[in-house]
Amino acid sequence: MLVKPERLKKGDTVGVIAPASPPNKENLERGLKFFAELGLNYKLGKSLYLEYGYLAGSDEERLADLHEMFQDDEVKGIICAGGGYGTARIASAIDYKVISRSPKIFWGYSDITFLHTAIRQQSGLVTFHGPMIASDIGKEEASLISKEQFKQLFHPAELRYTDTISELDELVSGTADGELVGGNLSLLSSTMGTTFEIDTAGKILLIEDINEEPRAVDRMLNQLYMAGKLQEAAGILVGDFNNCVPERELSLTLDEVLHHYIKLAGRPALKGFNMGHCSPHIAVPFGTRAQMDTASKTLTVESGIN
């Protein structure tokens, strides 16, 4: 059953955690100041500044932060500082009953995709794919449009994305209506064969990625296609594929790879959304209803909060 979290109000407290890699400390400090602009207070996860190789603390420490923030009645939303690597390592140890008993805003992207998928499919909670405090908001050149995405956490409003926001290209014509799911392609492919395997049946699937050669994108899309995930979807949205360029002379282009699999899937598809590792980065709720129309090049997404 779909569960929308409660909206934020001025004066509320949000929790900031790093369930994957350690965030850039300078960017994090700048990003934390943004909460004052939103009229919010914040609590920091205990592992936020820890470093354990490419992880922000041990699995147990990062898991404890996640559980504590959901259990803390003062915390009304949980904002991830950044991505990197590591969320899949804690997914099977999460107590999803804790989340079901205390549903609240959960926000992030990139490696956080694994948690979006796991939390939604295990608890029904709507989560938010959007720019993060250290990875995006804390950068010196942070986009004002990216910052404005947090407004949707205060006021329920339908998102309407048109080609006035970014250039959109029709890959396969048609319309689609369904629950919006997806995120980072690398993380979506890593769910395959696990308890948390992405369910795309009748849903609108968003994909994005960064720093993957076309041959790697090919491998991941082929895996999803062979598993039926692309052709089971109601529609496909192609977000930003930042720096996904070949490192060798003999290569297909990214567009050739994307077009090959999306046309094989035969589902209505649009490409060019500013969603993912890009600036500006448009945030969307996962789990709510969405409609897409390739002729008018529009995407409409229901609000993700109550």
Image (cartoon, rainbow, N blue to C red):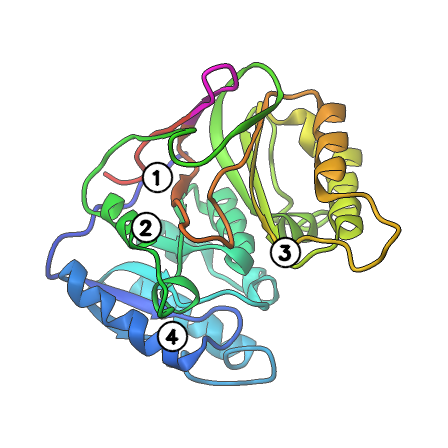
Q: Is residue 288 magenta?
A: no
Q: Dot 2: what SS? A: loop
Q: From the viewer's perspective, is residue 206 above or below residue 47?
A: above
The answer to whether marks 3 and 4 mark residues whose Cβ atoms lie closer than 8 Å is no
Quarter of the C terminus within the rendering? top left
The disc at residue 3 is: 1
For the residues carrying marks 4 and 2, which lies nearer the camera in this image?
4
Res. 31 image quadrant: bottom left
Q: Is residue 303 left or right of residue 131?
A: left
Give residue 103's mark. Answer: 2
Identify the residue position indicated by label 3 in the image: 243
Residue type at numbered disc 3: Asn
Do the residues bearing badges 2 and 1 touch, measured as CB atoms within 8 Å?
yes
Label 3's element? loop
Residue at the farthest left position:
11
Q: Using the numbered discs, state the Cα–Cα distance from disc 4 to disc 1 in whole angstroms.
A: 32 Å
Range of the magenta residues?
290-298
Local crowd size for mark 2, using a 10 Å CA cut-off: few (<14), some (14–19), many (≥20): many
**In which quadrant of the rendered image does the N terminus lie?**
top left
* Disc 3 residue crowd, few under 14, some 14–19, many 20+, Cα 10 Å: few
